[in-house]
Image (tube, coloured by chain):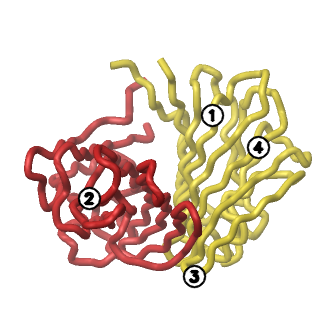
Chain colours: A yellow, B red
């Protein structure tokens, strides 16, 4: 059987950080999956994604989320990141599973699907768009609050269609 | 580079159905686990709740969910439930599909996991659901037991457990 789901890179943070970047991502896969499991250092932190280091307002999202009592459907446009857990309001532990499909093509804008959950706070599914035709060669998981906690694991997988 | 998405075990339910599907003696050699299932239960409804026990069920799980049924959405808290599957009054031959992802299942911290399920059946009601769950136990996950509200998981239901390595 051919190898079709391969780890590209992984890290376990040895100290808190505001971001972590996977760079020099090879273009040899069809899709990417980023799994992030861990906590934040602040109770009001969000896990976000930036692609190819683009800090422009080139991202938009549509999200469905539930808090255990209330359902929200939200949209954000012209942002500088894709929010994985909009209004998370919890330090976690969180799980983020980011699916980044057809990431290496240089013809279309890129769509991202992320499932985020914290059993104590929140569960959501978010569709994100990056308005760039560039192939994705770096992915940054970033928070704009104090930090991603030490011990958080981030693993990037590549999936081949054949 | 090695293929790291490895089938640990699978179950296909035979004639007469079963009361549960179990995976035991799960090795601790992977980083994450992924459980994929296609289930139909005998609950007299278009849907049947799907539950999961970990390591024999001695520690209860907690979860939050969000779900939609085609006309409204809701969110709540629950315990061992991981999906709304397909019940016995749903369109014949339809099975609810779902997935549960367990990061760091063999670690020494409490185990968080993420689940989702759908039970589309071309009828007047169907469901899509997301669950965020936590098992407050520091033990490595070594067994999983899937069961349903109706009490019997029907023939042709399937469950696959995969191990995922990050290196």
Q: Disc 4 is attached to a residue of which chain?
A: A
The residue indicated by pointer 1 is A101
Q: From where the camera sits, is residue A114 visible? A: yes
| Element marked by disc 2 | loop
Specify few, some or many for label 4: CA neighbours under 10 Å numbering under 14, 14-19, or 20 or more.
some
Q: Secondary structure at mark 4?
A: strand
Question: How far apart in space, not on screen, are marks 4 and 3 (Cα)?
Answer: 28 Å
For disc 4, the marked residue is A129
Q: For this view, does A75 lie left or right of residue B32?
A: right
Dot in front, 2 or 3: 2
Which residue is drawn at the image coordinates 9% and 46% (left, top)?
B15
- Same-chain check, marks 1 and 3: yes
**Residue placed at 71% from the left, 22% from the top?**
A105
> Going from the N terminus, do you reach mark 1 or mark 4 first?
1
- The chain that hosts pointer 1 is A
Neighbor class of circle 2 (other Cα within 10 Å; few <14, some 14-19, many 20+) is many
Label placed on residue A69? 3
B134 or A71: which is nearer to us? Answer: A71
Q: Is residue B37 visible?
A: no
Inter-mark Cα distance, 1 to 2: 35 Å
Q: Earlier in the sequence, mark 4 or mark 3?
A: 3
Q: Which mark is residue B88?
A: 2
């Amino acid at each position: 059987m051919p190898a079709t789901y391969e780890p590209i890179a992984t890290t376990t943070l040895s100290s808190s950080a505001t971001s972590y970047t996977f760079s020099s991502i090879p273009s040899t896969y069809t899709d990417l999956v980023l799994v992030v499991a861990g906590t934040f250092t602040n109770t009001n932190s969000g896990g976000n994604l930036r692609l190819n280091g683009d800090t422009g307002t080139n991202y938009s999202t549509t999200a469905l989320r539930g808090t255990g009592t209330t359902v929200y459907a939200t949209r954000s446009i012209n942002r500088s990141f894709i929010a994985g857990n909009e209004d998370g309001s919890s330090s976690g532990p969180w799980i983020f599973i980011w699916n980044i499909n057809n990431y290496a093509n240089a013809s279309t804008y890129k769509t991202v699907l992320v499932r985020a959950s914290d059993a104590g706070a929140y569960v959501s599914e978010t569709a994100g768009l990056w308005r760039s035709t560039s192939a994705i060669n770096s992915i940054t998981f970033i928070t704009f609050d104090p930090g991603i906690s030490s011990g958080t694991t981030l693993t990037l997988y590549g999936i081949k269609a054949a | 580079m090695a293929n790291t998405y490895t089938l640990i075990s699978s179950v296909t339910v035979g004639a007469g159905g079963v009361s549960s599907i179990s995976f035991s003696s799960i090795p601790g050699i992977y980083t994450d686990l992924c459980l994929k299932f296609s289930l139909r239960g005998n609950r007299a409804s278009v849907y049947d709740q799907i539950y999961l026990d970990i390591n024999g069920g001695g520690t209860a799980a907690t979860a939050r969910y969000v779900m939609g049924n085609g006309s409204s959405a809701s969110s709540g808290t629950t315990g061992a439930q991981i999906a709304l599957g397909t019940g016995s009054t749903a369109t014949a031959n339809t099975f609810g599909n779902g997935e549960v992802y367990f990061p760091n299942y063999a670690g020494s911290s409490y185990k968080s996991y993420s689940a989702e399920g759908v039970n589309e059946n071309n009828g007047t009601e169907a469901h899509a659901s997301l669950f965020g769950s936590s098992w407050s136990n520091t033990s490595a996950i070594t067994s999983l037991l899937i069961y349903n509200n109706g009490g019997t998981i029907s023939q042709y239901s399937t469950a696959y457990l995969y191990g995922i390595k990050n290196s």
